[in-house]
Amino acid sequence: MMDLSDLNAFVAVARARGIRDGARASGGSASGLSEAVRRLETQLGVRLFNRTTRSVVPTEAGLSLLERLGPALSEVEAALDVVNGFRDRPAGSLRLNVPVSAARLILPDIVPDFLAAYPGIRLEVIADENFVDVLAAGCDAGIRYDERLEQDMIAVPIGPRVQHFATAASPAYLDRHGRPEHPSDLLSHSCVRGRFASGAMLPWEFERDGEVVRVDPTGPLIVRIGGATDLAVDAAIAGTGVIGLFEGWLRPYFDSGALEPILEPWWPSFPGPFLYYPGRRLVPAPLRAFIDFIKGGRT
């Protein structure tokens, strides 16, 4: 008889293509997963992974096992979760993959009250700007904007339904260099830009009375969107140049006077994000509780 935890360890490592990444995705330890995989290979008498110093790649036997075992273990989890539904309050783990902007602007208004309402649920939030397969990453659901959702996902609105892209600079910078009156004026300003993990650096888009203007300004600082965004804000406050970011992220600095909004009539709006999850499997009780919570208006 195979140990169910050893089989789960194999699936975690195979999906993550690595011991450490598998441990992060599953919430276990790297040493525990490594030992479980060795134990499983010994019991089966078959090598399941080809190991190098840089990667752990499933063998043909490993891929065949993963193809059949993954859906079976999902069914086992779903069956056990049915029992969880009989509790007065669902319990268990919920893992969300979200962009840094959602972790900063959306979840703080939701998470504390949710955890207070469901003390048996342990929530883990992974902030990541890369678009990932939530199941392969060991997550139950994710938060993304509409243009980055996969077609086979179920999407539930979460957070404010209208957001704005805002531009701003420090009052001292604007006193020295002037205040732009049209988006095209930004081409003669120093701007703090952001680059996605994919390498893309999108132009700034503005809209007013049906007129859309896209500009691709330059400046002395480019940061990785997500992890280094606070550096960009600090640089703008210090007078490095003009920053473009979510209005909600910049609003506290508008209120304090550290940053001055510019081109406000041109700020474009866009729909708020969505909680998304695969529609091809039963929804775990902790995720169902979270969905019901945000649908109930606690956003």
Image: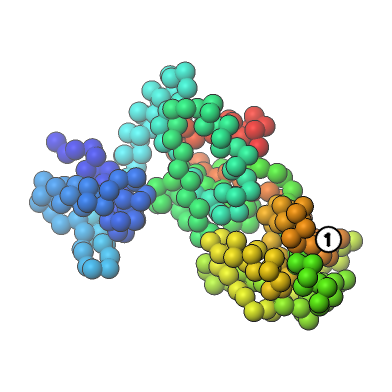
* Residue nearest the viewer, comparing 149 with 270: 270
Name the residue tied to disc 1.
Answer: 264
Can I make out residue 176 in this image?
A: yes
Q: Residue at x 32, y 33 (%)?
A: 76
Q: Is the residue marked by circle 1 packed among few (<14), some (14-19), or many (20+) residues within 10 Å?
A: some
How many marks can you see? 1
Q: Quadrant of residue 211?
A: bottom right
- Judged left or right of residue 119, residue 159 is right
Q: Amino acid at mark 1?
A: Glu
Q: How is the image coloured?
A: rainbow
Asked which secondary structure carries label 1, the reply is helix
Nearer the observer, 186 or 271: 186
Of residue 259 and residue 205, the one placed in the foreground of this image is 259
Q: Is residue 91 left or right of residue 202?
A: left
Depicted 254 relative to depicted 27: above or below: below
**Left or right of 102: which side holds 30?**
left
Residue extending furthest toward the bottom: 188
Q: Is residue 116 above or below residue 53?
A: above
Viewed as shown, does residue 141 lie left or right of 18? right
Q: Residue at x 19, y 47 (%)?
A: 36
Name the residue: 24% across, 43% down: 7
The correct choice, above or below, for 182 with respect to 123 in the image is: below
Could you say where residue 71 lies in the image, as x and y percent from the top left?
34, 42
Quadrant of the drawing holding the N terminus: top left
Locate the C terminus by quadrant: top right
- Residue 161, image x, y percentages: 72, 45
